[in-house]
Image: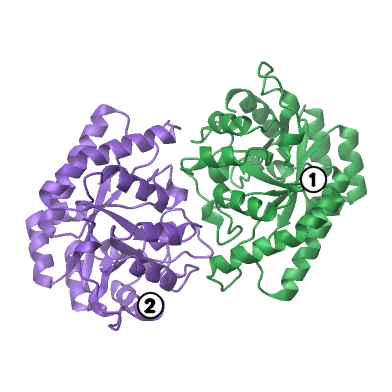
Chain colours: A green, B purple
Amino acid sequence: MGVSQMARRPPRDIDMLEPRLLSVNQVTTRERWSLEQAIDGYARLGIAGIGTWSESVRDLGLATAGRRIRDAGLAVTGHLVGGLLTDRDPAARRARIDDNRRVIEEAAELGARCVVTIAGGLPVGERDLVGARARALDGLAELLPVARAAGVTLGLEPLHPMICAARSVLPTLELANDWYEALATDGGDGLGIVVDVYAVWWDPNLASEIARASGRICAFHLSDWLAETTDLRLDRGMMGDGVIDIPGIRRMVEDAGYDGMREVEIFSARDWWRRDPEEVIATIKERYRTAV
Amino acid sequence: MGVSQMARRPPRDIDMLEPRLLSVNQVTTRERWSLEQAIDGYARLGIAGIGTWSESVRDLGLATAGRRIRDAGLAVTGHLVGGLLTDRDPAARRARIDDNRRVIEEAAELGARCVVTIAGGLPVGERDLVGARARALDGLAELLPVARAAGVTLGLEPLHPMICAARSVLPTLELANDWYEALATDGGDGLGIVVDVYAVWWDPNLASEIARASGRICAFHLSDWLAETTDLRLDRGMMGDGVIDIPGIRRMVEDAGYDGMREVEIFSARDWWRRDPEEVIATIKERYRTAV
């Protein structure tokens, strides 16, 4: 059974943009707030959820991180990074599978909605995309029973084609749906799809592939594409500052049955990472009302 | 009838990488060589074709440019820029259609294999991709009879999704094939598809969409994707310096019936544009043998 099928759809007349559905990925304030500070700050400022990164959780200690997040009353809308499964070298591949097992354990302890799972890029010196994709899919097949045993969902997240080489040979929702179907032959338990507007907004097949992902979507990520983007990874914009029709994509995702939280995840080395996190969160809350 | 169907396929046993099929787009040497210098230099260094830009041709004078290119014995493998048809403002749109008519006339005079035709990006302040795509397709439908009357082929070129907002709401070969079929209801005369490895290499549907473009491909553009790309438009690499499986894509294109020239088109503000064009051309010739 897919992720969203388990949850009852809220009635149409409630405010879909209510604050209880707003989450922020800790990367959004990473330069100025530690995980501890982010947990405290987000909760104090009325954010309902957090997206966490393994590195930070390990630094703070898993048990401590889990306790603090629970005490703060925050949902964990995603835990990163899962996947990165394209290595050809057997030792590197084994180390990555082991790390994924640990990430899955962490997600279970944190009660995360999903492990945000990315394919991985092309290994250094490689040009064989078909092979890299096959290895990623094999790795996911190996991890899926682990996730199921832990009660955790692997959320397959396609990333933008411009980071195909660096981070993700999974560049479209269509391929994410294909992989989901290849993996979920005995049902979609433990498997989901993450829709990040930044990664998919350009896709001519967006509407049909989101509809095809009905019942599969386990997380919905928000940021914006700046018309004058200056970096392939670290120049995302605040919702409303760019060209993405975010309300349009939100409606597609909702029409596909998703009624979970919206997680703001802004990689912005030149702008938002430099600002006071209080200002960043205040802006997110405002834009959540006006631009989502 | 599609473009390539008109040409007889060469026998399998000839060298597919023979020099007579190597063309260079003038943008590749734009910082150091004028169009005149490029015509002379390419011919002198054994390049068989050139891709031309309207702005340079107008600066030199159309008749002069055509005469010099013919005298140099160069084929014109593409003339740019056609398209850019996403404007909503009627006056801007009309001006663009008029410019396209002029570009088509130039391509006829130059004997260009095609007008390289790109969709255009999102107009400033717009977020409606569906509408922008519809306007681009409408504009193409208006221009197709003009191209046919001039004996010119409009080559639809999908560009990389990372420049969807800035330059091209046509980000995939799949959509280019859809548009081709929507426009070519009375046959593909005057219509083609341009395959640029830099724009499409990441696409999970690449093989099937190139096969679908059989008989439609009117130009094949070469450069490479650098693992450490630093700019969304002007950081293309030399063939062999990046991650694209260029020989693999070349074979797909050939299996789809394309037996025309290969045009090297490198936008590289930080590297190749700064080098001595003689060195750039020498490197292109070497990489054409070893990395294409």
The answer to whether residue B235 is visible is no
Q: Residues within 10 Å of mark 1 (few under 14, many from 20)?
A: some
**Quadrant of the image for the N terminus of chain B?**
bottom left
Residue at the outermost top position: A13
Q: Which residue is mark 2?
A: B287
User: Of the numbered discs in the image, which one, if any, rests on residue A34?
Assistant: 1
Viewer-side residue, B210 vs A81: B210
Residue at the outermost front position: A186
- The x, y position of residue A28, in whole percent, is 68, 42
Viewer-side residue, A118 vs A207: A207
Q: Residue at x 16, y 53 (%)?
A: B152
Residue A178 vs residue B261: left or right? Answer: right
Tell me the element at label 2. Answer: helix
The answer to whether residue A126 is visible is yes
Q: Residue at x 56, y 38 (%)?
A: A224
Q: Amino acid at mark 2?
A: Arg
Q: Amino acid at mark 1?
A: Ser
Same chain? Circles 1 and 2 = no
Image depth: mark 1 or mark 2 in front: 2
Q: Quadrant of residue B95?
A: top left
